[in-house]
Image (cartoon, rainbow, N blue to C red):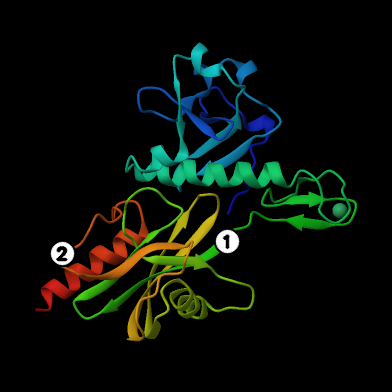
């Protein structure tokens, strides 16, 4: 694979650019990719030239100063609103861009010796010449699980999120755990149920800020639902034909887990 940085020599007027102002993205008429010659040079921070690819094309990702939106007749959009707009390309490109900028900003100095880091030869890591450590972008694996019991599924409302949606349970994979260990532990902690067979379904990159969501089904085995105080506001069994508001299957693996299960159960009747 190619590296994460643009070299100054390879820059051209034709480059397509994604501009971040703080943690928001510059958007005009719904378009978040700019041609480089649409933007004055002084608005492009030349020291951070991250490259993001969607598999076909490379895009230059950089930061612009606050207030640039008024010069370009543009607006600032949060990553979330861009992604929840349902645009898959935005999800991929802007999601990666956000993760790489965050990695670059937080690894400017070596965590071992404190010296300044620079991109390594491959462009895939930030490197400390003084102590020869390489720092690669890091993703954090999470398990997300739909607990199922025949025609019923367990949905919960998280106490911290105010979206009003009911969704699967989820949690970070802790040091030393397998993803299946996490599924069992999270279900036990969050709703006090025991699960039996666990089946992997699919994964999804989730750039808030840099998670890899691993989606599972977990068969209910035993126990009564007891929501974890402070964490789970409400949790209960729902009949698959009578569901509350759930996340969209277009943007989240949680939504896909639910939709896929409902379809499978409905067609097996
Ligand atoms: Zn070092």
Q: Which mark is residue 131?
A: none
Query: 18 or 261, which is in the foreground?
Result: 261
Disc 2 element: loop
Figure check: 199 above or below 73:
below
Quadrant where the N terminus is found in the figure: bottom right
The residue drawn where x is 68% and y is 48% is 123
Instruction: Tell which of 251 and 130 is nearer to you.
Output: 251
Q: Which residue is mark 2?
A: 242
Query: Residue at (64%, 73%) from the top-left corner?
Result: 175
The location of residue 250, given as percent across then percent down, is 29, 52
Please give left or right for residue 244 compared with residue 234 in the image. Answer: left
| Residue 131 spot, x, y in % from top left | 89, 56
Q: Which residue is mark 1?
A: 140
Neighbour tally class for label 1: few under 14, some 14-19, many 20 plus, Cα within 10 Å: some
* Direction from residue 124 to residue 193 in the image, left or right: left
Residue at the left extreme?
269
Up-down: is 106 above or below 204?
A: above
Task: Depth check: give the residue in front, 19 or 168.
Answer: 168
> Quick check: is the Cβ at mark 2 less than 8 Å away from ligand 1?
no
Residue 212, percent from left and from top: 50, 61
């Amino acid at each position: 694979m190619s590296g994460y940085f643009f070299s100054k020599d390879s820059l051209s007027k034709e480059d397509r650019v994604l501009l971040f102002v703080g943690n928001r993205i510059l958007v005009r008429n719904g378009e978040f990719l700019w041609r480089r010659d649409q933007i004055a040079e002084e608005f492009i921070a030349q020291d951070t030239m991250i490259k993001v690819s969607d598999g076909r094309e490379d895009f230059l990702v950089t930061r612009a100063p606050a207030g640039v939106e008024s010069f370009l007749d543009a607006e600032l959009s949060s990553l979330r609103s861009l992604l929840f707009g349902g645009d898959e390309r935005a999800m991929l490109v802007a999601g990666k861009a956000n993760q790489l900028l965050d990695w670059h900003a937080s690894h400017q100095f070596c965590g071992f010796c404190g010296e300044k880091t620079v991109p390594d030869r491959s462009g895939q890591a930030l490197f400390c010449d003084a102590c020869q450590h390489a720092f690669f972008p890091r993703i954090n694996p999470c398990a997300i699980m739909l607990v199922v019991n025949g025609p019923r599924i367990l949905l919960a409302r998280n106490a911290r999120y105010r979206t009003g949606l009911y969704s699967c349970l989820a949690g970070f994979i802790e040091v030393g755990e397998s993803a299946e260990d996490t599924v069992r532990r999270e279900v036990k902690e969050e709703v006090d149920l025991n699960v039996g067979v666990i089946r992997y379904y699919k994964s999804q990159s989730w750039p808030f800020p840099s998670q890899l969501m691993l989606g599972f089904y977990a068969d209910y085995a035993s126990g009564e639902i007891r929501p974890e105080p402070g964490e789970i506001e409400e949790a209960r069994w729902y009949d698959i034909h009578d569901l509350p508001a759930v996340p969209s299957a277009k943007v989240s693996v949680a939504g896909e887990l639910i939709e896929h299960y409902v379809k499978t159960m409905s067609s097996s009747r």
